[in-house]
Image (cartoon, helix red, strand yellow):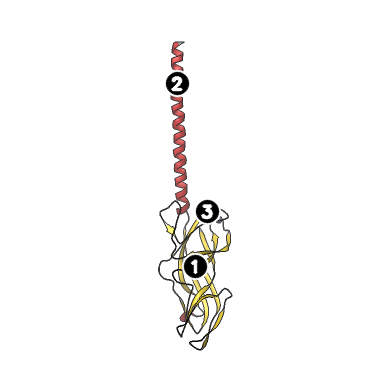
Amino acid sequence: MKTMKHVTEEVTPIRLRINGEKVFNKFIAWLFFRMFRREKRLTDYPRLKLALLFKAELENVTDVVPGYDEYEWHFKVKCTSCNEVNNNWVGVNRLDQNEIPGSRGSANLVMRCKFCKRESSAQFDTSPVTPYTIENSGKFAQMTTIECRGLEFIDFEPRATVGTDSGTKFEDIDLTDGDWAEYDEKGGIPVGISEVQAEFKRV
Ligand SMILES: [Zn+2]
C-alpha cells in the first residue's frame, strides 16, 4: 500500500511534464510556421517588371509627362494570386514609401487584394520619368518601369503635364478620352494631343 501510493505520486508529475513539453513544442512549431508563412508571403511572388509605354500624336506639343515628384498616378490593378481585377483606380505616388508587413522592405504601393486578401506591392524605378517627346510622336515610347509583386497593372489613367514650343505648360490635362486640344495664347497656335494609347509590357 505504502509503495503503490509512492509510485502514483511520482508518475503524475512526470506525465504532466511530458504533456507540458509537447504543448510547448507544438507552440514553438506553430510560431515557426507563422513566422515562415509571413516571410514566405512576401518573397514567394516572382518579381514582375512592367514598362509603361505611351503613344500619341502631338501637335505643336514638345513633351508630355504624367507628372513629376508629387504626382498621384492611377492604375487598374489585377491580383496575380487570384487574377481578379480591382475596378477602382489605385493611386500611387512615387515618393511614398510604405512598409511591407513582415519585411524590412518598403514600396510605393502596398495593398491587400479585396478578393483573396493577399498582400502585394509595387515600386517605381527611381530614375526620373521619361517625358514623351515630339520625336516619339506616333510611336510607342517607354516612360518608366515598375516592379510588381503579387499584382499587375493593366490600365493607366492618362493625365499629363504638357509642354509647348512657346514654353507654355498645361497642367493636369485629362487624356482619358484619347485626345485634347487647346489654343496656346503665347505661341498663337493651336496645340493638341490625339490618339492616346498606353500599355504595359513585361520587361
Ligand atoms: Zn487576389
Q: Residue at x 56, y 82 (%)?
A: 181
- Residue 22, given in percent of the width and then of the height, sits at 46, 32
Is disc 1 surrounded by few (<14), some (14 to 19) or many (20+) residues within 10 Å?
some
Ligand 1 within 8 angstroms of badge 3 C-beta: yes
Which sits earlier in the primary sequence, circle 3 or circle 2?
Answer: 2
What is the distance, in whole Å, between disc 3 and disc 1 at their CAs?
24 Å
- Which mark is nearer the camera, 3 or 1? 1
Q: Earlier in the sequence, mark 1 or mark 2?
A: 2
Where residue 119 appears, x then y in whole percent? Answer: 50, 55
Residue 25 position (above or below residue 175): above
Query: Which label is found at residue 72?
Result: 1
Foreground pick, 158 / 166: 166
Q: Residues within 10 Å of mark 2 (few under 14, many from 20)?
A: few
Residue drawn at point x = 51 percent, y = 88 percent: 189
- In the image, is 197 to the left or to the right of 125? right
Q: Which residue is mark 2?
A: 11
- Residue at numbered disc 3: 118
The outermost residue toward the top is 1
Q: Amino acid at mark 1?
A: Glu
User: What is the spatial separation of the Cα atoms under label 1 and label 2, in whole angstroms?
Assistant: 69 Å
Q: x%, y% of residue 195? A: 56, 78
**SS under mark 3:** loop
Residue type at tag 2: Val
| Residue in the foreground of this view, choosing between 164 and 186 | 186
Image-based side of 82 in relation to 28, left or right: right
Q: Amino acid at mark 3?
A: Arg
Disc 3 packing (10 Å; few <14; some 14–19; many ≥20): some
Q: Quadrant of ligand 1?
A: bottom right
